[in-house]
Image: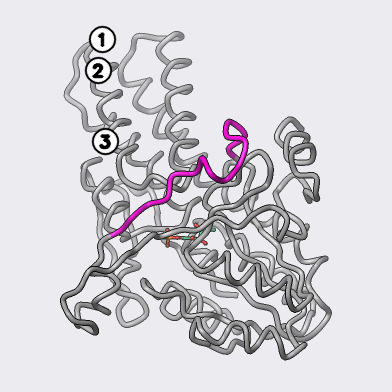
Amino acid sequence: MYVAQPIAWTDRGVVMLDQRRLPAEEISYTYTDYREVAKAIREMVIRGAPAIGVAAAMGVALGVLHSRAASLEALRGEFAAICDTLAQTRPTAVDLFWALERMKRRFAELSAATSDLAQIRQGLVAEAKLVHLEKKATDEAIGRFGAEFMPAAGQVMTQCNAGALATAGIGTALGVIRVAFQQGKKLHVLVPETRPYLQGARLTAWELHRGGIPLTLITDNMVGHFLKSGKVGAIVTGADRIAANGDTANKIGTYQIAVLARENDVPFYIAAPVSTLDLSIPDGSHIPIEERAAAEVTHIQGVRIAPDVHAAHPAFDVTPARYIAAIFTERGVARAPYTDSLRALAAS
Ligand code: MRU
């Protein structure tokens, strides 16, 4: 089954598929400068929480590899600047900060063990490749845990794009659907288009179609209508940050889907790696919500669809834990009370 490859480490540099151009064009760029990687994250050439983490790890490796520092002290200074630049790209997805912390830990280990700069550089490249490699195994494990919760047949719904494009593995929410489909479950996926950036219409529809998984694309304002039909057996979405109590930030529109799911007795699930947990914050009110350009609301693909008025664009919303039936991770399934179950999974 086709699996999209949003990012790859190559001898020429970091290659990224430009997700802004999908599905019309499949264009890739090769980056050799970490500042270009930071710009690519900010401008959404690559997006989706886990994939942003992979890109950040590769950005750090790229920066260190091409740094002209001739001493450990100089490299240490540049390393900090590289991490700061990458940290300032997108605020909500905690995987970005998880990946930077991991690269910082590895830098500290390597620099404590050797002062050979070539070895430190190669060690950080290896770590970034490992971060990428691990995503595949992580997604597959999430998929196996989550697939059990999918109905044997019928409609399921997702939101945004939590597929291979968003994780650099097989996807989290779409990984669950993919594994269930491969197990023989006869699923049909309802895909909300996910205004304003249209990750559902452009990316999820593209991935499912390429993977041969049946789908129906719907507009965001059709969600209630379809959930009320009694034909949707489950909803599964990804996450950008999960607080200690299970409150979950995901793409704008997820909260209203979860509330409508409760109203219509449809189980609403989250699929996310342990790296998306942020147990340092007690609840969702502490999650920073990225505010993106109003032009992404007033325009679609560069074409103005509204007059020149004020427009708001919070890119994420927070679904309170009480609406979430379960959270699928690579270490197992968390159930309410999430404060206990998530802590146990994180420690396992
Ligand atoms: O703004 P995006 O496209 O980066 O937002 C992506 C989402 O909200 C995804 O649902 C989330 O990152 C989970 S990706 C596995």
Front: mark 2 or 1: 2
Q: Nearer the viewer, mark 2 or mark 3?
A: 3
Q: Position of residue 305 (x, y in %)?
A: 24, 84
In the image, 141 versus 255, the foreground residue is: 255
Residue 240, given in percent of the width and then of the height, sits at 52, 52
How many angstroms separate mark 3 from mark 1 (CA)? 19 Å
Neighbor class of circle 1 (other Cα within 10 Å; few <14, some 14-19, many 20+) is few
**Mark found first going from the N terminus, 2 or 3:** 2
Amino acid type, label 3? Thr
Question: What percent of the width, then of the height, locates residue 185?
Answer: 79, 80
Q: Is residue 343 above or below residue 50?
A: above
Q: Amino acid at mark 1?
A: Glu
The residue to which callout 2 is attached is 77
For residue 85, the mark is 3
Instruction: Kindly identify which numbered label has been placed on residue 335.
Output: none
Residue at left offset 65%, top offset 88%: 226
Q: How many numbered discs?
A: 3
- Residues at badges 2 and 1 in contact (C-beta under 8 Å)? yes
Task: Answer left or right for 86 relative to 220.
Answer: left
Work out how far the residue at label 2 is from the one at label 3, CA to CA, in angstroms.
13 Å
The quadrant of the rendering that contains the N terminus is bottom right
Which one is earlier in the sequence, the residue at label 3 or at label 1? 1
Is 50 placed left or right of 331 in the picture? left
- Crowding at label 2, few (<14), some or many (≥20) Cα neighbours within 10 Å? few
From the image, state whether disc 3 or disc 1 is nearer to you. Answer: 3
SS label for mark 3: helix
